[in-house]
Image (spheres, rainbow, N blue to C red):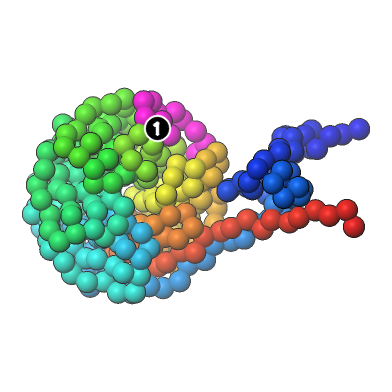
Amino acid sequence: MTTYKEIRGSQIEAVATDPSNPVEGQVWYNTTSNVLKGEAATTAGSWASGGNMNTARREMGAAGTQTSTLAFGGYTGSPPPSALTESYNGTSWTEVSDLNTGRMVGAGTGSSSTNALMSGGNSGGGGIGNVETWGGSSWTETTDLNTVRDSAAGGGTNTATLVFGGYNTTVIANTESWNGSNWTEVNDLNTARNYLGGTGVNNTLALAFGGAPYPSVSGLTEYYNGTNWTEVNDLNTPRRDVVGTGSSVTAALALAGYTTNPVGSTEVWNGTNWASDTSLSLARRWPGSGGTAASAVVFGGYATTVPAATNATEEFTGAGPVTRTFTDS
């Protein structure tokens, strides 16, 4: 007789609490409630319009949540790169204090509109190593990156950040860890690339995806465990100019980007695989983003093949499992 494990590839687990991120078809026995349960399906996420930014721009840094977001720097379509900073409360954007050094394609990280870090970027004359920290009211210059770069990605807070990849005369794989005071070189990405997406909890857990040396695109995904990068399953849509957001390395989003044109593709990472979800209403490349896999925000970027920026904001309500309880009736 064929068993459940032979059909599904796993056995029925006995757990004290329901799994937080079950996959369709997964079955488990809850030993607390003495009930057999399973996930019947996963509902699709949805995008809705949010408040427009005050200044349209692309290639900016970003940090925060859907209701407490910071957007900083970027390119408005005419030089030099911008130093403008705007804060989003889930309804509207407000201009706050500017960066000390205007720049685009920097690595923005942080947990809210009062906690952010801007690392590297391009100030108009090439890559820079300048780093600035945001404490809620102003930007402060702090210790520079060890390796000057632009078009890198990052994840974490303004006291525990990881910055990886980017460009410095050539595409690089260099990874640096920030502890709130200093940068330390750690193990490189397996594949050097720039214009990639990334997310992370702090400087010990991160996810890097997409990007590639211009003009190529890639779906490569790598996971950082605090010591090494490991290649894991690829994005379904290879792309560059992609952004990411998420509250953990087992629940993240890859958003927007560029293949041969801007894309609105949304993919959800569950710790093992990427799954395609509802696309953005406006396809765009290199926007800003913040939030979690369940509650995210995307803003700015550019939606055509010419360097025109948008100020459009979209908010994501994520997919969720539909759990069923089995009975003997």
Establish if 17 lies above or below 231.
below
- Residue 319 in the figure: left or right of residue 326: left
Circle 1 crowding by C-alpha within 10 Å: few under 14, some 14–19, many from 20: many
Provide residue 296's location: percent of width, then percent of height.
42, 60
Rendered residue at 32%/44% (across/down): 155
Q: Residue furthest front?
A: 32
For the N terminus, the quadrant is top right
User: Which portion, as a residue range, is magenta?
Assistant: 222-234
Q: Is 280 situated above or below 28?
A: below
Front in this rendered view, residue 249 or 309: 249
Can you say which quadrant of the picture contains the C terminus?
Answer: bottom right
Asked if residue 75 lies left or right of residue 258, the reply is left
User: Where residue 43 sits in the image (x, y, percent)?
Assistant: 62, 60
Q: Is residue 132 above or below residue 76?
A: above
Q: How many marks?
A: 1
Q: Give the vertical position of 222 relative to 77 (above or below).
A: above
Return the residue nearer the eye: 192 or 96: 96
Location of residue 72 in the rendering, given as x and y in whole percent from the top left corner: 21, 58
| Residue 322 visible in the picture | yes
Tell me where residue 133 appears, x and y as whole percent: 16, 49
Left or right of 153 in this view: 143: left
Dividing the picture into quadrants, the one containing residue 216 is top left
Q: Nearer the viewer, residue 320 or 147?
A: 320
Q: Measuring 35% from the left and 66% from the top, which residue is drawn there? A: 67
Q: Answer whether residue 274 is magenta in the image.
A: no
The residue carrying mark 1 is 224
Q: Nearer the viewer, residue 215 or 150?
A: 150
Element class at badge 1: strand
Seen at 16% across and 66% down, the residue is 96
Query: Residue type at mark 1?
Result: Tyr
